[in-house]
Image (cartoon, rainbow, N blue to C red):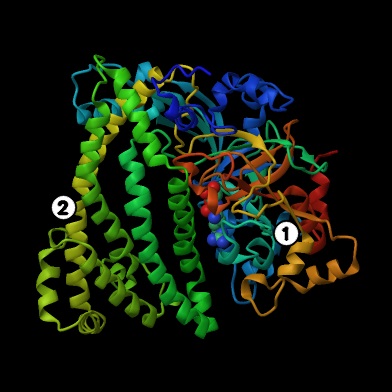
Amino acid sequence: MKVKCVVFTLAAATSLLSMFQARADEGMWLPALISQRIADMQAKGFHLTAEDIYSVNQASLKDAVVLFGGGCTGELVSDEGLLFTNHHCGYGYIQRHSSVEHDYLKDGFWAMNRSEELPNPGLTVRFLERMEDVTPQVLEGYDAKMDEETRAELVRKNSEKIRETAVKDGKGLKASVEALYYGNQYFLFVFREYRDVRLVGAPPSSIGKFGGETDNWVWPRHTGDFSIFRIYAGKDNMPADYSEDNVPYRPKKSLKISLAGVKEGDFTFVYGCPGSTREYVHSAEVDYVANVSDPQKIALRTTRLDIMKKYMSQSQAVRIQYSSKFAGVANAWKKWQGEEKGIRKMNTVAEKREFEKGFEAWAKGKPCEGITDTLASLYARRNPVFRAYEYYNETVRAIEKLQMASGRPVSAKDYYRPIDEETFTAMMTAFDKGLDDCYKPEYFLKSRERFASMEEWKDAVFADSLEAKNLAEALNTHYSKVIAPQVNSLGRRINLANRTYMKAQMEYCKDKTFYPDANLTLRVAYGHVRGYSPADGVSYNPVSTLTGIIEKDNPDIFDYNIPQTLRDIYARGGYEAQPVCFLATNHTSGGNSGSPVLNADGNLIGINFDRVWEGTMSDYVFDPDFCRNISIDVRYILFTIKEIGHADYLLDEMTFVK
Ligand code: ARG
Ligand code: GLU
């Protein structure tokens, strides 16, 4: 056993080892550099080559993957521009087409021919044309004595030039220059953006959102989380504004759909755009996340969710008004619970501290010596003010009255004053108790004296719009003029130190291949279909079936009330083993929603839509025993199109393989 990157004692060896070697199936890799991983992928069961994943010379899998709507991923499944993504990614568009007469969220939507497909102004998809290392061009004119602000300005200017050149003369070309490894490397991404994307199909929410917030981040899972769109182009196949004359886009590559199914141990990979991870940061940051930030945000959101729940359970109308807001608040709330627990269970703070000790022993006499101490003291300064910053986000910004008073739009249709009033009292009390006075504006401190209780203060704010306006303005100003600038300036210094630390870690751990932290750029993660054991005596299968849906079915519970058609189909018999969702060990994150999940031959077996909550610490530390991504089995999509949507004609344009 030889680990180059550390001087360690035997006792510490086992725990340290896990820190330094990428854990089995950990990693989200840049497609253009996948040749570095291809041997490992093939050893684990992959049948194709690096060129099949990414190539600028021939059609490759990258040409079948898109960044969908700026925050999700989608994939091409026909040569006529047909695209799959998640239901929760298409949600806003489905909602916009819905009315009292046509409730497509509730009932689903199925275009029965091309002319029934619905345009979505503002919705775009981006295909990656190419990506390349542009570090020398981005850093042209840089010298090591530059301060961080000057460097940032230089990077901005150079990147602008690179982007301009990259999109010249191209139809619908967009370019971005992204920092990798905290700015040790820069990559140019050139995309072609299509802007006529039409809604083709969506299951009813009772399928597409089956399990609702109850099952969110949870296994066993039975959510049919998919929706279908079609990309349109001008006659030259290039991006065009919406027009009746546009024709279905002909992709360079579309995915074949595997009907072979999945089983425990099968090789699988995910091709998509994870948003953000922090795998290489200092122990002080992880300590803050697990022991301060997550617990505080969870507590504040629990209070808000309880308030919403109380009123939502009393009235169907309020439930409809607040269901989307509730989902938004509950999603991260649940994720943070797994993250906090997972970081603690993995002992990550202590492990990182050990690592930092070993690192500093190695760094003695090198230019990076002391960088972990620098980071520790920067975090010690940043954390208190960052905590206040997060408090503002979770309390002040949770009060719709203050949002309205700040001129931010709040939909009157979806506003229920009793919820907002109770939220005001609870969140302002928490704000007052939770933060030192130095983080509060003068106006807040003075007003606090004017009212006998928070209740009285609330009545004044809700009765008098000037009172609301003054308070909102004072809080907003303090946030943006006092708190945020400190957070940003310390953030820049931390980023600078992280750049040094990152580079040094890569030298220290020479034998480890570091994948860059996620930043919504295209990545490949690979692993295996695999169940897990979340607790003593509990063991999960990696696949779920229609039988599980019927077991959960309950007309009295909103989240579990399935369409009658589905009950009837099941009762007919023969669909007991119809696959619905499956688990795998692919390292994914938020943004991977809608990503294609592929088998060893590069054929589509599912669409990624979630992780299990016990594994959400994978944004900081990956545990092969607990980190699982959740996908909808592509065969459940086909089943739903046929049996629920009766849109069989869509299947005619897809290609199926055994
Ligand atoms: N947890 C998944 C994600 O982070 C799904 C969220 C949407 N679904 C829901 N039930 N809220 O995006
Ligand atoms: N549902 C998430 C998304 O929107 C994916 C789940 C995750 O965070 O892994 O991207």
The residue sitting at 24% across, 17% down in the picture is 367
SS for tag 2?
helix
Residue 73: % across, % down: 57, 44
Choose between 150 and 270: the one closer to the eye.
Answer: 270
> Image quarter for residue 119?
bottom right
Query: Residue at 64% across / 76% down in the picture?
Result: 557
Identified by mark 2, the residue type is: Val
- Residue at the (80%, 71%) spot, across then down: 567
Q: Is residue 243 visible?
A: no
Question: In this orientation, does residue 381 appear?
Answer: yes
Q: Which mark is residue 482?
A: 2
- Who is closer to the viewer here, 374 or 554? 374
Q: Which residue sits at x=43%, y=42%?
A: 347
Q: Amino acid at mark 1?
A: Ala
Q: Residue furthest top?
A: 365
The residue that label 1 is drawn on is 111
Q: Is residue 496 left or right of residue 228?
A: left
341 and 285: which one is in front? 341
Residue 475 lies, in percent from the top left, at 20, 63
In this view, the mark in front (1 or 2): 2
Left or right of residue 333: residue 124? right
Residue 165 in the image: x percent, y percent? 42, 23
Cα distance in 3D space between marks 1 and 2: 52 Å
Q: Nearer the viewer, residue 490 or 357?
A: 357
First in sequence: mark 1 vs mark 2: 1
Residue 529: x %, y % from top left: 70, 41
Quadrant of the drawing holding the C terminus = top right
Residue 345 in the image: above or below residue 135: below
